[in-house]
Image (tube, grey):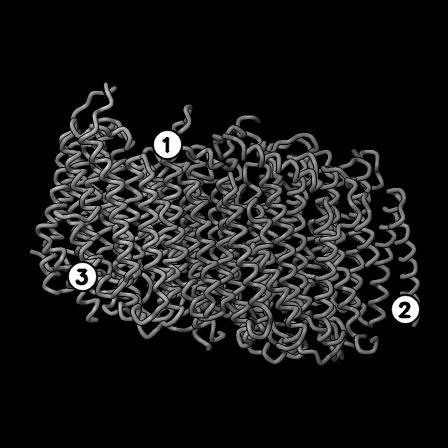
Amino acid sequence: MMFATAALGVIVAMALAMFRAFAGPTVFDRILAVNTAGTLTVVLISVFGFLTERPEFLDIALLYALINFTGTVAVTKFVQFQGLGYPVGDHEDGDV
Amino acid sequence: MFTPETSMLLALLLPLVGGAFILLLGERNRNLREAATILTSLVLFTVVVGLTTDVMSGATPTLVMFDMVPGFAISFTAEPLGQIFALIASGLWIINSIYSIGYMRGNNEKNQTRFYLFFTIAISSAIGIAYAGNMLTLFVFYEVLTLSTYPLVTHSGKPAALAGGRMYLGILMATSIGLLFMGMMWTLSLTGTLEFTPGGILAGKAEGPLVGVLLFLYMFGIGKAALMPIHRWLPAAMVAPTPVSALLHAVAVVKAGVFSVVKVIVYIFGIDLLNSESSDNWLIYIAGYTIIAASIIALRQDNLKRRLAYSTVSQLSYVILAAAILAPISIVGAAFHIAAHAFGKITLFFAAGSIYTAAHKTEVSQLDGIGRRMPFTMAAFTIGAISMIGLPPTAGFISKWYILSGALETGQMFAIGVIIISTLLNAAYFLPIVYAAFFKPEVSPPKHPHGEAPLAIVIAISLTAIGTMALFFFPDIPLGLAQTLAQTAAGGN
Amino acid sequence: MMHQKSVLRVVSKLLIPPILLFALYVQFHGDFGPGGGFQAGVIFATAFILYGLIFGVATARRVIPAAATRTMLSLGLLLYGGTGIWSLLLGGEFLDYNLLASTPSAGQHLGILLVEFGVGMTVAGAMTTIFYTFAAQTLGGDDTPKEEV
Amino acid sequence: MTAEPNIFLILLVIIPLMAAPICVLTRNANVAWSISMAVAWAVLGIAIKLVMELSAHDKVLYYRIGGWDAPWGIEYALDKVGGLVILVVASIGALTLTYAKRSVEKEITSERIYLFYAMLMLCISGLLGIAITGDAFNLFVFMEISSLSSYVLISLGKDKRALTSAFNYLIMGTIGATFYIIGVGMMYMMTGTLNIADLSSILPAVADTRTILVALAFLTVGISLKLALFPLHMWLPGAYAFAPSVVTIFLAATATKVSLYVLIRIFFTMFGRIDVFETFPLQPVLFGMALAAMFIASLAAIWQQNIKRMLAYSSIAQVGYMVLGIAIATEAGLTGGIIHIFNHALIKGSMFMAVGAMAFGLGVTTINDMAGIGRRMPLVMAAFVVGGLGLIGIPLTVGFVSKWALVSAALDAEMWPLAALILLSSLLAVIYVWRVVEVAYMRPSPENAKQPVQVPFSMLAPMWVLALASVWFGANATFTMDLAHSAAGHLMEGF
Amino acid sequence: MFEIHAGLFNYWAAIALMMVGFYIVIAQGNLIKKIVGLNIFQVAVFVFYISMGKIDGGTAPILGEGIKVYSNPLPHVLILTAIVVGVATTALALALVVRINRSYGTIEEREIIEINHAADHDEDTRL
Amino acid sequence: MAGTAISMLWLRDLFAVVMLSGIYSLFAAVLYVVMDAVDVAFTEAAVGAGISTVLMLGTLALTKSKERAHKKISYGPLVLVLLTGGVLIYGTLDMPRYGDANAPIHSHVANRYIEKSGSEVGPPNIVTSVLASYRGYDTLGETAVVFTAAIGVLVIIGRRRKNKKDTPQAPKTKEGSTS
C-alpha cells in the first residue's frame, strides 16, 4: 500500500513535469522537464520493483539514471554549442 | 548422299554457317564475302532439292531437336507444302544474292556486311518455318524472321526508313504476340498438343463460334499474310533496298505468312472441321475484300514499288482465298500460287530496282519509253506482269486456274466474282506501265543518259523471268508437291 | 570548450569508471537479472560518448581510436559466428553449445557467455563508431566526395 | 518429414555473413574483393549442391540451429522454390562480384571500396537467409540485414539523388518490415508459434478469425512494399536509377525476387493448409495490382529518358507478371510465377550489366547518350539487345518461356481476358526496348563522340554468361520448367 | 461494449500510437520528423507485442523461488531484437539525413522533390 | 504517451520533438516494466532515451532545427492511416484478452522455455536463455544488423583517411588528390 501510494505520487509529479515539457516555452523549460521526468522514472521503476515484490530489477533504474545524465549533458552541449563533437581536431586517422 | 533428316538439319544450319563466314570476312574481303553468300545459297538449294524426291515419294522425314518447354520440342518435318516453300526460298535466294551484289555495289550502300549477315539469318528462319513440325517451332522462326528482317528494312537508317521499320516491326510483333501466340496457346489449352497433324488437331475439340474466334486469331495473327487491315506494314517497308523488298515480297516474308495460313488451315484446323462449321465464312469475304481493295489502291499509286506492294497485298489474299475455299483442288492452287507469285513478283521488283539503279527513277509516270533503253529489264517486267494478271504462258495462269476450279467446284460465286474482277484490275494497273515503257516516246531529252542495269542485275532478272515461264511449261515438281498436300489435307493422312 | 566547467569534468571523470564497471556487471549478470550483451555494449559505449561529449571527440579518439572501435565491431560479430562454427567443428550443429564443454550445462554456460560477449563487443564498437562519425561531422567542411550530377 | 540435417544450409548463410567483418578488418580494397569473390563462388557451389540434392531426392532439406527442435529453436528449411531462389541469388552474386571489381573502382571512392564489399556480402547473406529460413521472425531479421545493407549500397551512387532514393527506400522498407512484424505478431498471437511449418499446421484451426484475416492483409501489404508491387513501388525507380551499377545489377536481379518468394511462402506455406485464395478475397486485389503494374509501369518505362530508370520501371512491370502468376493460384500459374523469378533475374542481370558497362565505357546515363553505341560498343549493346528481346518475350529467350507458362496457365484456368492482357502488356515492352535499340544502332554517333574506354573482360564475361544463359534456358527450358513445376506442385500441396 | 472488449483496450491504445506514428511518417515533410514518426510507429508495435505476452498475476520471466506464473518470455526476446534493428535503422536514416542536408541544403521533402525534378528535367532534355 | 506522440505531430521545433521522443521512449520503458518485460525496458531505456536521442541531436546540430511550415492536415495520408487503424482494430476483435493465461501464445511454445530452460540451458533469466540459446541465431542476425548499421554510417558520412604516405590505397580518383 505504501508503495502504491508512492507510485501514484510519482505519476502525478511526472504529469506535471510533462506539462512543462509540452508547453515549453523555452528550451530550458523543456530540458529541465525532461530531466525531471527521467529522474521520476527512475524512482517509479524502483517503486514498481518493490510493488511487484521483485526488487532485484533495480538495475534498470540505475541504467536510467546513468543514461539520463549522459543525455542531459548531450542536450545542454547541443544547446550551447549547436553540436556534439567539438572540438573535433584534426586526426590523421579518419573514419573510413 | 545424306539421310533426309541430316539434309534438313543441314538446310537449317547452312545459312548460319554462311553468315558466320560473312561476319568473319567482313568489309575488307568483300569479294570473298560475296562468294561465301553465293556459295552458301547454291549449296543450300542443292540440299533442298535433294530432299524433294524424298518428300514427293510421300516420306515425311522428321527431326525432333530438344524440348523447348517440357513436352514441346523444336521439331522439323518435311512435308509437301513446306517443301514448296523451302524450294522457293532457297532457289530465289541464289538469284537474289546475285542481284544484291549488283544492287548494293551499284548504289554504294553502307553496312553491307550487316546486310548480308541478316539476310542469311532471314533465309535460315524461312527454312525453319518451312520445315516446322509444330506450331511452336513455326512461331519461333516466324518471330526470328521478323527480327532479322528489321535491320534490312531500316538499312539506310534515314528517318523515313526508321519510321517504316517501326511500322513493320510494330504490326508484325503486335499481331504475332497479341493474336497468333494467343491462338496458339488457346489451341494448346484445348487440345494439349501443337503438332501439325494431317486432318487438323482441333477437330472434335472446338466447335461453333470458338472456331471462328480461333480462326480470327490465326488469320490476323499471321500479320505477314497481310490481310486487310493489317497490311500496312508492307507498303511501309518499301523504304528498304530493292533486294530486301524482293526478300519480303517474294522469297521469304510474305510467303512465310501465306504459307503459315495454309499450314494452319490444313494442319491445325483441318479442312473437314472448317467445312462443317459456318463460322469461317468471313474469311472468304475478308480475303476477297483485300484482293479488290488492294488492287484499287494499287491502281492509284504512282510510285512503282508502292504499286507493286499493293499488288502483293492483293495477290497474297489469293492464297488465303484459295485456302478458305476449302476444296482440295483450290489448296493445290494456293500452294502453287505461293510459287507462282514468288517468281512473278521477284521479277517485278528486280525490274523496279534495276530501273532505280540505272535510271534513278521511282515513279510510274517517269517510265515513258524506258523499254528502249532497258529492253531486258522491261521484257522481264512484262513477263512478271502477265503472270500477275494470270495469263498464259506464265505460272500465274496455272494457279489461277486451280483456284477458279476449286471455287467452281464448291460453288463459291463470291470467290469467282472476286477473281474475275481482280484479274481485270491487275491488267488495269500493270499493262499501262508496259505500254508506256515500250510504246510511248521518251520525255526528251533525258537528264541522265543511261543504258541497261549492271550485268549481275540483268542476269538475275532474266533468270527469274525465265523461271516464271518455266513454271508454266514444267509445273511438275511444285504441282506434284501441291497435289500430295491436297491429298493429305482431304484424306486426313 | 568546457575547460571552465570543472564540476562537470570532475563528475564525469568520477563517473566513467563506475559506468564501465556497471557495463561489465550488466554483461555478466545478464544470466541472472535483466541485461546482457546488448545492454552492456550500450552502457560501455555510453562511457565513451560521455567522455567524448565532455572532453571533445578528438581526445576521446586518442583514448580509443576509430580503427580500434571498428576492429572491436568486427571481432564481436566474428566471435559470435566463430562460436557457432566452433560447435560445428566439434560435430554439433551451428550454435549448439552443448558440445563446447564437458557437460551440456557447462557448454551452454560457456556458449552464452561467449556470444553475449560477442554481442557486447559489437554493440559497444558500433555505438562508439556511430557516435564518432556523427560527432566528427562539421557544418561547413565537406570532406565526403562531392556529388556529381 | 524429419530428415538428416543438412550442414550446407547453414554454411550458405554463415559464410558470407562472416566474410563481412573479415572484409572490414582487411581495410584493403583488393584483399576485400578477393575474399568476397572467393566467398561468392563458394556460396554458388553450395547452392548448386543443394539444388542438386533437392532435385535428386524429392524432399525438403532441414537444419536445426543450435540443436533445438523446431518450433522451439530456429529451423532452416529449403524446398524447391527456395532452391530456385538461392540459385538465383548465389549465381547473380558470384557473377556480380566478378563484374564488380573494375566497375566499383570507377564508381566508388577508393577508400570506401572495402566497406562496399562488406555490405555486399551482408546483402547476399541476408537474401539467402530469407530464402532458407523456416522461422517467420528470423525472416524479419534477415530481411533487415539485407535491407539495411541495400540502403547503404544504394546511397553510394554518385548522383545526389541516390541519397534521397536510399532514404525513401529506407522509410518505405521500414514501414514494410513493420507491417510484416505486425502480421507475424497477430499470427503468433493466435497460434503461439513462429515456425512456418508449425504455423501452417495450426492456422487452419483459427483461419476464420478476423485477426488472421487482418494478419494476412498486413503480411501481404508489408511484403508488397518490399516487392515494389504497384502502387507501393514508389521507392524503386529512383533506387535502381541512381545506385552504383553493381548495386543495381545485384538488387534488380535478386532483391524483389526474394521478396516475391516470401509472398509465395506466406500464401502457400504458412497459409498452405487453408486455401488462401478461396478463404480470403485476395485474388481480385492481386489481379488488380498486378495488371496495374504491368500496364502503368510499362507505360511509364516508355517515357523515361534515364536508361536505368526505364529498366527499373520495367522491373516493376515484370513483378506484376510474377504476382499475376501467383494470383492465378493454380499449379500452372504458380509455375509461371516461379519460373519468371528465375528468368527475369537472368534478363535484368544481363541488361543492367550492359548498362553498367556502357556507363563504364562512355559514361552513359540517358538514352540519348546511347546514339550509335551499337557500333562503338558492339558486344555490350548486343548483350543488352538479347536481354531486351527476353523482356519482350521473343522465342528462344527466357522471356518467351515465362510468357508461355503464364499464358497457358491463364487459359487453363479459363481466364482468357487475363491471357490477352498479359500479351497486350508485353507489347508495351516492344516499344520501350525498341526505342533504345533504334537509338543505339540507327542513330549516328554524335560528331564529337568519345572513343569508349575498353570494357575489361571481367565485366564482359559475366554479362555474356547471363545473356547466353537467357538464350540457353529460353531454348531449352526443360530444367527450369521442371524445377518450377515440381516446386509449384509442392507448394500447392501445402508444404 | 466495455464488458466485451475490456481486454482489448491495450491493443487499441497501441494501435492508436501506431497510427500517430504512421501518420507522421507519411504525411510530414521533414525528414527528421519522419524518422521520429517511424520510431513512434515501431515502439507502438513493440508495446503491442509485449502486451500480448503479459499474463495476469504473472511476473518477469526470471526464475525465482516460489514463483508460479511467469509472463511469456518469447515476445520479449523478439522485441529485444526488433528494438536493436530499430535503432540500427534510425542511425542509418540519420546518417542519410546528414548527407542529404549537405547535398541539397535542406531536409524538407518538398524542396528536395523540387530539386530532384529539376535534375530529372535536365537529364531528360540533354542531348 | 499518446499525448507525447500527438504533440510531436504538432510541434515544429525539431529540438522539442527530439526531447519528446526521448520521453515517449521513457514511457514505453515504464510500460514494459509494468508488463513484466524488464529486459526490454532495459534496452529501451538504453536505446530510446540514450543513443537515439544523442544521435538525433547530433543530426540536428548539422541541419536546421526548425521545420518549415506545412499544411496542417493532409487528408490523403489521414484517410490511409484511419483505414489502416480501422483494419487493425477490426483484427483485434478476435484476439485473446489482455492477460488471458489461456491464450494460445502461452501454451504452445513458450511453456517449454519456462519449464525447461532452467535445466536445459541454465540461466535463471529465461529471456537470456531464449535469446542466446534457443533463438541464438536471431541474435546473431541482430548483431549483424548492428554491424551493418555501424559500417553503413561509416560508409555514408565517414570521413576519409588523410592521405599519408603509408595509406594503403593509391587513389586514382580525383577525390583522392584534393586533400
Residue D27, can we see it?
A: no
- Which one is closest to the eye, mark 2 or mark 3? 3
Disc 3 residue crowd, few under 14, some 14–19, many 20+, Cα 10 Å:
many
Residue F63, can we see it?
A: yes
Pinpoint residue B28: horizontal percent, then vertical percent: 21, 30
Label 3 sits on what residue type? Glu
Residue behind mark 1: B158
Which element is circle 1 on? loop
Label 1 sits on what residue type? Lys
Label 2 sits on what residue type? Phe
Q: Are marks 1 and 3 on the same chain?
A: yes
For residue D28, above or below residue E6: above
Residue behind mark 3: B79
Pinpoint residue F116: horizontal percent, then vertical percent: 63, 77
The residues bearing labels 2 and 1 have C-alpha atoms spaced at a distance of 91 Å
For residue C12, above or below residue D494: above
Check the residue under mark 2 and report the chain it is in: A
Residue E24 vs residue D118: left or right?
A: right
